[in-house]
Image (cartoon, helix red, strand yellow):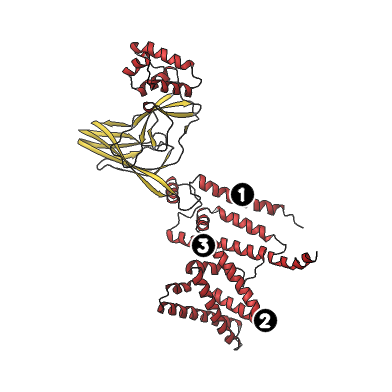
Amino acid sequence: MHSRKPFYIFVALLFIVGISTSIYRGLVHNVPFLPGEQVQSWAIDAKVSFTGTNQPAEVNFSLPSDPAFDILVENASSPGYGLSISADAKDRRAVWSIRDASGPQALYYRVTLVPTGKLNIETDIEPVTPEPYLWPATEKSAAEQVIEEVWTRSATNLSFAQQLMNLINDNNQSQNMALLLSANTSTNLFLHMLHSKGVPARVVNGLQLEDQRRRQQLTTYVQVYNDGEWVLFDVANNKQGRDNTLVLWEYSGHSVLDVMGGTNSLVNFSMLQDTRSALATSIDMMMNDDAFDFSLYQLPLEEQSTFKGILLIPIGVLVVVFLRVIVGIKTSGTFMPVLIALAFIQTTLLTGLIGFLLIVAFGLMIRSYLSTLNLLLISRISAVIIVVIFIIGLFTLISFKLGLSEGLTITFFPMIILAWTIERMSILWEEEGPKKVFVSGGGSLFVATLAYLAMDNELVQYWVFNFLGIHLVILALVLVMGQYTGYRLTELKRFKPLVGEQ
């Protein structure tokens, strides 16, 4: 007897791989686990303007690369200008150039951002210790007293920065702090004090997102390095950290905008919030990233629509295997209920049941006449197929004349399968009587109905197409049920009299 251990290992692998790939798809590719989920996106326009000085001009503009936002779409409008975008992921920049720029110039950059929720900026690279800031002679003594006072009360870079920010925004300012703030902005003072103690810190430029805002400017913040992470400080508002409405437009330490061959350069931002499908957004992001994808999204829409129907068949098969192997329901034909369930999806359940019963009933009557002719099997089956087509055509015409549009969908029934079903039921009727026909036919309709309910479920349809790993799980379940050799649930009634005797 062969060991079943390899079989169970194979089934376990199918189950684990199926679940793992589905989770990976949801977490890494951001494919939502539930249909109908929406995400918010931000369309941002940046307008760069300057005055040309009748000479070649080059505009170097920083582009966003914030891990808290994914770039869905970006484009630029710059008639007459050459444009190149650097591929450096950490310092993306657009460079416009032209041989002759004279008078007012306007360049546009548009980007659509989708929040990712990754608000923390972590790094494995230890930043270089900054050079101590050289304080002016009039500020040096006051600055050193304030810094030493705060330094002794702190334990880490983070606590030092937190206490400095609180002290800068304290309503009861000391004379030293008031002197320093009279000569420095709060953000610059905060940065200089950090550098004076060798704490890595840098100025970053961020854009606060707000729906339908125009002519917005970038705001200056300070990031402080602490234990592998850059922590954001909004010194002017005495706030630490950030939310998902703040885009760090530039945080590599370079300028946001450099213009050569022009004067009066300025950049303004306008923004608009939008809501879009989470699934469509994930697909667009995967297409942008050229991610290695096992999905069917890259197929033409017609083929995608076809596969949406095909991928429902494993669900119907799983229902049939469970009801036949575990429950013990008898059907006419092994997988005929699955095909009938597929037809029900097109016709709706009630119309499909009525159409199926009418076709089979009329087919059995015609088949009973054909049996009196003693035809060969092939000829008889062929005749039944032709008769089934006539019956479907007749019912379709009658439905059309009566104005019953639902009846027109009866053409979705698989005609060959119906012909074979009629042939089997007719033989069963002749050999074992009408009771067996009703049991077999009723079982088929019952299984087809349950398979239809499973296959027509919106959540099931969504999962089988967007999470292909589910099919490996279905395969594992079918293989496991294939090993079942015990009594069916319907067979347990055999033991009921024995239980009663005890």
The label nearer to you, 1 versus 2, is 2
Left or right placement of residue 502 versus residue 138 in this view: right
Tell me residue 126's x, y (percent): 49, 26
- Against 37, residue 44 (above or below) is above
Left or right placement of residue 343 versus residue 480 in this view: left
Neighbor class of circle 3 (other Cα within 10 Å; few <14, some 14-19, many 20+) is: some
If you read the primary sequence from the N terminus, does the residue marked by circle 1 or circle 2 appear first? 1
The quadrant of the rendering that contains the C terminus is: bottom right
Which residue is at a point 56% across and 84% down the rendered structure image? 365
Q: Is mark 2 on a helix, strand or loop?
A: helix
Callout 2 amino acid? Glu
If you read the primary sequence from the N terminus, does the residue marked by circle 1 or circle 3 appear first? 1
Left or right placement of residue 194 versus residue 11 in this view: left
Q: Residue 16 carries which label?
A: 1
Residue furthest bottom in the image: 373
- Against 257, residue 9 (above or below) is below
Callout 1 amino acid? Ile
Tell me residue 338's x, y (percent): 56, 67
Neighbor class of circle 2 (other Cα within 10 Å; few <14, some 14-19, many 20+) is: few
Neighbor class of circle 1 (other Cα within 10 Å; few <14, some 14-19, many 20+) is: some
Q: Is mark 3 on a helix, strand or loop?
A: loop
Residue at which label 2 appears: 431
If you read the primary sequence from the N terminus, does the residue marked by circle 3 or circle 2 appear first? 2
Residue at which label 3 appears: 456
The quadrant of the rendering that contains the N terminus is: bottom right
The one of 5 and 278 positioned closer to us in this rendering: 278
Callout 3 amino acid? Asp
The one of 305 and 77 positioned closer to us in this rendering: 305
Residue 134 in view (yes/no): no
Please identify the quarter of the rendering in which residue 175 is found.
top left
